[in-house]
Amino acid sequence: MCGGRGFVVAEPVRELLSPRRVALGESTEVRRLLPNLGRRMVGAWCFVDHYGPDDIADEPGMQVPPHPHMGLQTVSWLRQGEVLHRDSTGSRQLIRPRELGLMTSGRAISHSEESPRSHARLLHGAQLWVALPQAHRHTDPRFEHHAGLPTVTAPGLEATLILGTLDGATSPGTAYTPIVGADVSLTRGTDVRLPLEPDFEYAVLSMSGEVHVDGVPVLPGSMLYLGCGRPELPLRADSDASVMLLGGEPFEEELIMFWNWIGRSQEEIVQARLDWMEGTRFGEVKGYDGAPLPAPEVPTVPLKPRGRVR
């Protein structure tokens, strides 16, 4: 279990999170930042994978077979390359750099992700999850694709709004909690301050280049947790660089996360596994050349409650 306002640091901090390497699907390795040994959530953001840049010119690239989700939204975000999304609602969409692929699982959905047969040489991006609050976690599943997203600019900075609101700009993606996600590009020598919401907690994921976040050097593939209480965020780029700003109102509900599901009890997780393995509830992904992923066994011991911080 994770979540709960009582576990949120109510002041600015600088907590550097290192990734762990995880195999994704059949041919991609990712750097997992959330959940982390030290931290489980940032606002409603509860899962962050960073991958690439990978040279896939002579490789199949990303190949993630059909798998289920419930109780969350997935955010597919690319800096380089393309990913073909298919899901059990019938959606089929090629996602390109700086286009938002937003899937709301609600009560149940399944999807696949793959590099198209003819694809760009480099693949670089992030896959993120947003936890759905109790009032919306059983909503109908849906997929959104937004090719045109608003931007915030300053000298040497351009921020593309992925989800939520930043400095008066709002993403068209559907959000169910107060949240923000932004892709921030910085030119070499930029020294700026990005306006923030003091009531939000934030983290910054470094995607590329050399960047100092509130004075802390953050290497590509690592993430700096910032806590709450900041009206602005100092950013300095020693080279052309890009980061993802993730934040939101601290998520007050406690969650159980197991495999690709977010629930509120072990019974829900057990039922979700049974439904997936029996081919009910999560629907069918049509068009993917391969078998769906089998679900892992649910542990025989009860899933233990866990807070936001171990």
Image (spheres, grey):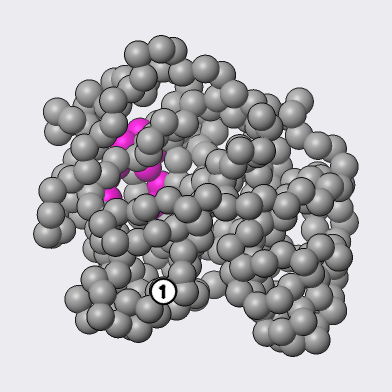
Per the rendered image, the range of residues in magenta is 103-111
Which amino acid type corresponds to the residue marked 1 in the rendered image?
Asp
The answer to whether residue 109 is magenta is yes
Task: Please state the horizontal and vertical placement of residue 28, each as a whole percent of the image.
Answer: 35, 61
- The reply to whether residue 234 is in sight is yes
In the rendered image, which quarter is residue 254 located in? top right
> Which quadrant holds the N terminus?
top right
Residue at image location 48% in from the left, 22% down from the top: 264
Determine whether the residue tagged by mark 1 lies in a helix, strand or loop: strand
Q: How many labels does the image show?
A: 1
In the rendered image, which quarter is residue 54 located in? bottom left
Task: Please state the horizontal and vertical placement of residue 4, each as a whole percent of the image.
Answer: 68, 27
> Which quadrant holds the C terminus?
top right
Q: Nearer the viewer, residue 8 or 53?
A: 53
- The reply to whether residue 165 is in sight is no
Which residue carries the number 1 mark? 54
